[in-house]
Image (tube, rainbow, N blue to C red):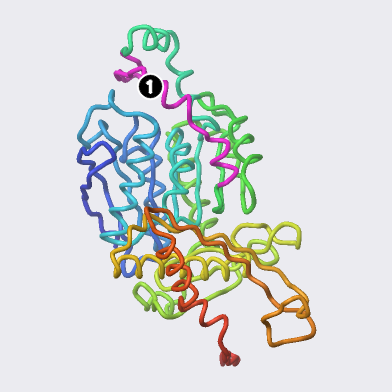
Amino acid sequence: MTQRQRVQFVGSTSDTLVGRLDLPEGRSRATALFAHCFTCGKDSHAAARIARALVAQGIAVLRFDFTGLGESDGEFAGTTFSSNVGDLVKAADFLREHHEGPSLLIGHSLGGAAVLAAAGAIPEVRAVVTVAAPADPAHVTGLFGDEKAEVEARGEAEVTLAGRTFRVRREFLDDIAEQPQLARITDLGQALLVVHSPTDNVVGIDNARRIYEAARHPKSFMALEGADHLLTRTPDAEYVADVIAAWVRRYLPDPRPDALSRPGGDPGVVVVSESGDGRYAQQVVAGRHVFVADEPDAVGGNDSGPSPYGLLLAALGACTAMTARMYAERKGLPLDSTSVTLRHSRIHARDCETCATGAGLLDHVDRVVSFAGDLTDDQRARLLEIVDRCPVHRTLTSEVVIETRADPL
């Protein structure tokens, strides 16, 4: 039986936002965050139907009213597209603290543009779905008609949308005109499903084409023939919900009972398995964290995640910076930040004067560490010595024993 919780959290403009968290019976397989259409709300027909279908598949869903709409506090006239994106990030923060971070983002209409913009700021996200979304958020200003000119001239004006009147300010127009949406779509980094009706007379089907062409794989498109923009017909909303629930299965964590029985995952265990998205893409589960590894396009991968050597360098770089931070805090050094640039290559052993191996090829990592802060030369030199002792560095330069065995079926 579905459990529905009324939740509250503080949004990006410090107003209290109200949402509904729908939970499946038993342990959730994953969590989705839903963004409603412009001036709609969490209880719209599409939002309710999609949430119901996902909960039936074991996926928890949070849908909430953006600032100034529905049950949420705040003034709608004081919001912008950026504040809506900020509200989504705050909703993800709430989920992370009280439930689990969202691995699926779904956005309807302008909410679809918002989830594309917010995805990069929510680390748990593995898949994104847009429904009737504009390729450019500024598309919504075309619905203002002659009232747009009044907003620009007077600084604010009443705008009528879908039979309802809202006050819009010039700040909204300025903010939405400056959104780098194309770059966000290109750099998305998560699986994408674009859902759009060829007969949508509010946001034309060409928007779906632009989103799909800008995105990288893995990506999918579903044409919802005959549906209107708001999915007001129950069969249309239900069909979209069922398709999303089926499509997202391959991008979510392993639903096997033994996987679900490990709350949060063991922080000392990493599980890697083929994701099915291309030749080499892998799903990596490290404790509570889930991400993708892949190979670049040049070697037959989809470049949907870092390569194995990219992950190795990332581990060394992260450990380097963390070690510097720990030492600086312990010694009271004025270290503002540390950045590490790494590159892996293969070199001939004869070119390495300090290596014990004299023949063949060797793995070589070039690491450049930059320390920002009011540090003396001696302090910088000492930090450089310390980071050479970081645990990952020591593991890579020590004798490592790797035992491999087959998992019994």
- Inspect this view and state whether residue 409 appears: no
Which residue corresponds to the image point at 50% horizontal and 54% vertical from the top-left? 127
- Inspect this view and state whether residue 179 appears: yes
Point out residue 169 in the picture as x, y percentages from the top left corner: 33, 18
- Residue occupied by mark 1: 162
Element at label 1: loop
Quadrant location, the N terminus: bottom left
Point out residue 63 in the picture as x, y percentages from the top left corner: 33, 46
Between residue 371 and residue 40, name the one nearer to us.
371
Between residue 190 and residue 361, name the one nearer to us.
361
Q: Is residue 161 highlighted in magenta?
A: yes
Q: Is residue 326 highlighted in magenta?
A: no
Which residue corresponds to the image point at 75% horizontal and 62% vertical from the top-left? 300
Which residue corresponds to the image point at 56% horizontal and 87% vertical from the top-left? 398
Which residue corresponds to the image point at 57% horizontal and 39% vertical from the top-left? 183
Between residue 62 and residue 315, name the one nearer to us.
315
Between residue 90 and residue 42, name the one nearer to us.
90
Point out residue 91 in the picture as x, y percentages from the top left corner: 31, 48
Q: Is the residue marked by circle 1 packed among few (<14), some (14-19), or many (20+) residues within 10 Å?
A: few
Image: 268 above or below 403: above
Count the marks: how many? 1
In the picture, measured across the screen, residue 20 lies left or right of residue 274, that is left
Quadrant location, the C terminus: bottom right
Instruction: Find the magenta span and give its range.
Output: 158-187
Point out residue 206 in the picture as x, y percentages from the top left corner: 62, 30
Which amino acid does the dot numbered 1 rest on? Ala
